[in-house]
């Protein structure tokens, strides 16, 4: 037989290869035009995939084919078929039909919006993601904002390697969540460039105020990477109308130089170049002045001539670092206004409703008896739907192993174990531990109700979810009404309304409810006449409790719909054993992360917080939440300020391995939003400060620039 030639191989495999084609069809042409805002059409490639062709009809029309659209410079690609446009790099997401973000990032459209596809677990991922190219943020004279390559020659080179950042949209708080410090700084530059002098409708903050929040989340006392410094420089070029943003950027630059000698690196010669206040920022013209003195003077003038604005004010620690003086004072006396007493009864009903729903879920896990159940308000007959209607094999049943044998019987009878006293003693301890475990299992099994059919549980969960969501929305509206309420017949009330319209008084957003839940006095930042009132803080805690139950019911509904019995059982066995009013920090952590603290995690954290257990060793298996839950829980409680005091009761130091430090800092900032991380000999110092942020953890910043002298330690 004759050997195969390259031409024969090409001909034989032509129907199994991706074919580079021109975007001739309407669908491919429209998709290419849609991606034109993100990448130049000259660098967008369209491939016709072989599995889109029918073997019997190699000349099938393009409309019935499957295409892959690639942007090789950004390493992004999409697959187009008859039903949807799916992302290859983000496998659970499709290209959204609406590619424009509303009420944010004005005059900027160089991004791609992805939506979660219908077949994915909607609770495990953000509903939307936004992909933005990495590079320099620039603004032209018309106000349009764009992102271009760091080096101009890479803008039109086909072999240039461009990067991108992806941001998830938080389902409850409606803000974009970044993955690391570099992407967070890039997002801050976009907010600063696209922001106006009036707050955005959803987040109730201006672009500069949002940028200040993001910069604070990037705080570190280790050197900034080259990428981080470039993004910080972009932010500085758009701070001409916000002295506080310029000073926060300066504070981040100074803090990154505190311990540069400990990291074995040279001090960066390049410094931030600040523009003149009020100067135009076209084309990123940031070479106005090397000094930040103009912004310092502008900030002090603003603080003296305007009323207290929580979103524009620096924290005391920031003022000490960049100003050297304190101007951080509380606003003057505005009078007092007590919240409507009739609201107290409504708030009590929220807590009672949440308790009733929680008891029903605890009943399913066997932690309480049927006699302790009661129908939540407005859900008559809900308890009866948690009772078994029939005994079928398709139901969710609890099958504890009552007569399980000791699992180490073979080892117990071996010669090697019995020949030493130590071996026999260890085996006796293991047997005793096993017997105690069985006693707990038997006691819990007696409380467990008979199995309930999964479809019956799903119906009960969906009913409870609808009722909880209704109460949560009611609580949300009530809290905003309480905060915004001012007496109409008093001059101060008219003044507050006018100041809110001009952004001289901040408007509350959802994340501010969490802050008020932690610090009752924070309501005074939004309504100075209610600074001493505790009603809003208690209502905020009730709203957060309803949020946690709503997220739990969403997970239960999904597990029941997918017949995931193991996940359903595991979720039902988690309930709150601690007082949400006593530990609002933990509650805020649950709401922001859309998680629930497990019972094991609470027991370990409580043991570590107990003064009597000082020095004890506590064991929690790998992957059960030591780093992500237990440590933050302990930090939050230990760093809590004393009642009425300005300083925390404890100065918390967390010692982490060097290789874990960056990973932990990235997770903390991304998950809990306001968590910062820094190191000095791999030690982290955390304190809690007053700030217009939700979870406010600031590090002990008086660290040395010299190994021999530690300030404030």
Image (cartoon, helix red, strand yellow):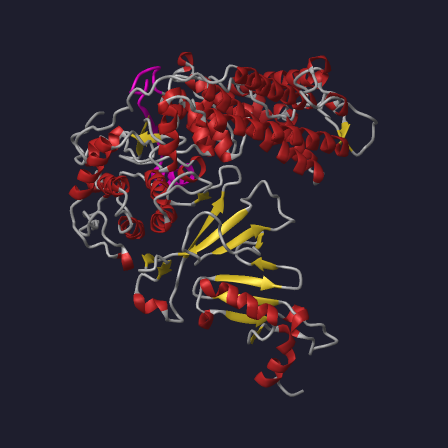
Residues 514 and 117: in front is: 514
Check residue 647 for magenta coloring: yes
Residues 415 and 565: in front is: 565
**Please, is residue 64 above or below residue 629 in the view?**
below
Question: Which residue is farthest bottom?
Answer: 2
In which quadrant is the N terminus drawn? Answer: bottom right
Indicate left or right for 655 with 709 as reference.
Answer: right
Check residue 475 for magenta coloring: no
Query: Can see residue 703?
Result: no
Magenta span covers which residues? 641-668
Horizontal and vertical percent for residue 702? 22, 30
Query: Can see residue 41?
Result: yes
Question: Which residue is farthest front?
Answer: 489
Horizontal and vertical percent for residue 679? 29, 36
**Please, is residue 675 above or below residue 519 in the view?**
below
In which quadrant is the C terminus drawn? Answer: top left
Residues 436 and 275: in front is: 275
């Amino acid at each position: 037989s004759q050997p195969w030639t390259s031409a024969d191989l090409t001909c034989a495999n032509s129907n199994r290869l991706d074919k580079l084609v021109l975007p001739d069809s309407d669908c491919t042409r429209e998709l290419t035009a849609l991606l034109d805002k993100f990448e130049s059409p000259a660098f967008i490639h369209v491939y016709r995939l072989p599995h889109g062709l029918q073997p019997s009809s190699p000349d099938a029309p393009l409309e019935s084919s499957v295409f892959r659209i690639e942007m090789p410079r950004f390493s992004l690609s999409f697959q187009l078929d008859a039903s949807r446009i799916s992302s290859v790099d983000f496998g659970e997401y499709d290209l959204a039909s609406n590619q424009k973000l509303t009420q944010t990032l004005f005059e900027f459209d160089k991004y791609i919006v992805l939506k979660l596809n219908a077949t994915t677990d909607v609770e495990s991922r953000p509903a939307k993601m936004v992909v933005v190219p990495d590079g320099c943020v620039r603004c032209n004279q018309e106000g349009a904002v764009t992102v271009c390559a760091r080096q101009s020659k890479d803008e039109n080179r086909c072999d240039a390697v461009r990067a991108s950042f992806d941001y998830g949209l938080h389902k409850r708080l409606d803000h974009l969540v970044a993955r690391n410090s570099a992407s967070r700084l890039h997002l801050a530059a976009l907010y600063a460039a696209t922001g106006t002098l009036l707050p955005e409708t959803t987040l109730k903050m201006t672009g500069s105020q949002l940028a200040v929040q993001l910069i604070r989340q990037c705080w570190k006392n280790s050197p900034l990477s080259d990428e981080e410094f470039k993004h910080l420089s972009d932010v500085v070029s758009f701070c001409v109308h916000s002295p506080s943003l310029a000073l926060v950027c300066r504070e981040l630059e100074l803090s990154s130089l505190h311990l540069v000698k400990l990291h074995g690196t040279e001090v960066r010669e390049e410094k931030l170049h600040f523009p003149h206040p009020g100067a135009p920022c076209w084309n990123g013209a940031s070479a106005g002045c090397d000094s930040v003195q103009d912004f310092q003077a502008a900030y002090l003038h603003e603080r003296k001539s305007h009323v207290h604005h929580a979103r524009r004010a620096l924290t005391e620690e920031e003022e000490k670092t960049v100003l050297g003086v304190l101007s951080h004072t509380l606003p003057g006396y505005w009078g007092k206004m007590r919240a409507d007493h009739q609201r107290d009864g409504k708030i009590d009903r929220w807590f009672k409703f949440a308790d009733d729903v929680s008891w029903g879920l605890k009943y399913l896990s066997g932690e309480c008896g049927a006699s302790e159940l009661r129908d939540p308000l407005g859900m008559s007959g809900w308890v009866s739907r948690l009772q078994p209607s029939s005994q079928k094999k398709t139901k969710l049943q609890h099958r504890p192993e009552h007569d399980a044998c000791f699992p180490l019987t073979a080892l117990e009878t071996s010669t090697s174990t019995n020949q030493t006293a130590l071996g026999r003693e260890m085996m006796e301890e293991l047997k005793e531990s096993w017997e105690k475990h069985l006693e707990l299992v038997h006691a819990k099994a007696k409380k467990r109700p008979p199995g309930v059919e999964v479809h019956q549980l799903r119906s009960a969960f969906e009913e409870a979810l609808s009722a909880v969501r209704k109460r949560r929305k009611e609580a949300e509206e009530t809290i905003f009404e309480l905060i915004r309420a001012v007496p109409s017949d008093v001059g101060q009330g008219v003044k507050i309304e006018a100041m809110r319209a001009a952004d001289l008084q901040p408007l509350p957003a959802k994340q501010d409810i969490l802050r008020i839940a932690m610090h009752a006095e924070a309501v005074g930042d939004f309504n100075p006449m209610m600074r001493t009132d505790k009603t809003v803080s208690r209502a905020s805690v009730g709203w957060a409790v309803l949020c946690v139950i709503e997220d739990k019911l969403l997970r239960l509904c999904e597990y029941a719909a997918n017949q995931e019995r193991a996940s359903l059982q595991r979720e039902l066995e988690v309930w709150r054993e601690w007082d949400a009013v006593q530990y609002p920090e933990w509650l805020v952590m649950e709401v922001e992360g859309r998680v629930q603290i497990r019972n094991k995690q609470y027991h370990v954290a409580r043991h570590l917080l107990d003064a009597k257990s000082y020095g004890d060793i506590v064991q929690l298996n790998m992957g059960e939440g030591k780093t992500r839950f237990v440590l933050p829980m302990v930090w939050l409680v230990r760093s809590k300020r004393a009642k009425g005091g300005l300083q925390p009761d404890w100065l918390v130091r967390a010692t982490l391995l060097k290789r874990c430090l960056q990973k932990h800092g990235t997770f903390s900032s991304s998950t809990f939003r306001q968590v910062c991380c820094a190191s000095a000999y791999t030690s982290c110092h955390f304190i809690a400060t007053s700030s217009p942020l939700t979870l406010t953890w600031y590090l002990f910043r008086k660290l040395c620039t010299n190994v021999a002298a530690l300030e404030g330690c």
